[in-house]
Image (cartoon, rainbow, N blue to C red):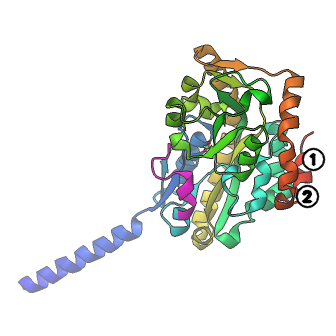
Amino acid sequence: FKGLLAATALTTGLLGAAVTAQAAPMVIKFSHVVAENTPKGLGAQHFAACSEKKLPGKVKVEVYPNSQLFNDEKVMEVMLLGDVQFAAPSLSKFQSYNPAMQVFDLPFLFDDLAAVDRFQRSDAGQGLLKSMQDKGVLGLAYWHNGMKQLSANKPLMTPADAKGLKFRIQASDVLSAQFDAISAAAIKKPFSEVFTLLQTKAVDGTENPWSNTYSQKFFEVQSDITETDHGVLDYLVVTSAEWWNDLPDDIRQGLSGCMDEATKVANEEALKIALADRQKIIDSGVSKVHALTPDQRAAWRDAMKPVWQKFEGVVGKDLLASAAKANA
Ligand code: LMR
């Protein structure tokens, strides 16, 4: 009888465990490198909250900001291994997955964020989302951050002011060529190291949009920021194509709807955050913000534009033309 009781208890226990296992929500990890109070940070949080609301008990979405889990140099690799499910690296970080993605880095190609947005929504822009599936990567959405500014410990008013300086850049050959074009040196380093590189003067300057310059406190270790708006730093939200396609239909649809919502949030907030963070930097008085006259800006454009020709073959003439056409 004791034996029977024990067996019953064991069976009930096992059944209980099975029921619990079945009911456990699917854990989904979203890893990124910026602060929470940025367009990407807000987008990721919205995606998590929306998904858990839309798919109650079915998914648990954990967001890891600030390179807490992985930096961009590692995240794509681990995503394909299944260690994280979502990431949103900057568009500058996809050259080894599709060289044509380098179109986004070409200096002075887009007049402003509205032009970037038009290109991303065009057939050519949408085509890029799905262009890396042969490498296992599926792009789900573009998220804005903003146009980039140049910073250093001196005012950079003309390209000659940057000559001989060393800049931290993202891992992008176009960005490397961009600094080459103005006789400056560029070193590719992970985002999480930028503050220390600037603080210790291992590099002289960098380029980033206002929200990164503010939220990572780069402005506290750079005396001057020049409003060059010379390029864009936006994101591609990516997942593993295999993981995504194998999801149960209801979960994929729920996540997809929340991705659309989160995209709206990130993209509506981006310009507002850029303007607000720019103002906070000016108000801090810690770093001087320099505007350029149209002639000064034209000089930067003339100095950097030869980079287009260098990458035209890699990016493709048609794609470059479609991007340029997005300027109204
Ligand atoms: C950088 O490395 O500077 C950016 O890609 C960081 C980011 O995600 O905005």
For disc 1, the neighbor class at 10 Å (few under 14, some 14 to 19, many from 20) is some
Q: Amino acid at mark 1?
A: Lys
Return the x and y of residue 283 as percentages of the image width and height. Answer: 62, 14
Q: Is residue 214 left or right of residue 12?
A: right
* Residue 294 placement: quadrant: top right
Secondary element at image label 1: helix
Q: Are marks 2 and 1 in contact (CB under 8 Å)?
A: no
Return the x and y of residue 195 as percentages of the image width and height. Answer: 52, 34
Residue nearer the viewer, 261 or 213: 213
The structure residue drawn at horizontal position 13% and vertical position 80%, both measured from the top left corner, is: 6
> For the magenta stretch, what is the residue range?
65-77
The magenta stretch spans residue 90 = no
Name the quadrant where ligand 1 sits. top right
Residue nearer the viewer, 286 or 19: 286
Which residue has dot 1 on it?
325
For disc 2, the neighbor class at 10 Å (few under 14, some 14 to 19, many from 20) is few
Q: Quadrant of the C terminus?
A: top right
Q: Is the residue marked 2 within 8 Å of ligand 1, measured from its CB?
A: no
Q: Is residue 154 above or below residue 21?
A: above
Residue nearer the viewer, 176 or 282: 176
The structure residue drawn at horizontal position 67% and vertical position 41%, both measured from the top left corner, is: 185
Of mark 2 and mark 1, the one earlier in the sequence is 2
Which residue has dot 2 on it?
317
The magenta stretch spans residue 70 = yes
Q: Amino acid at mark 2?
A: Lys
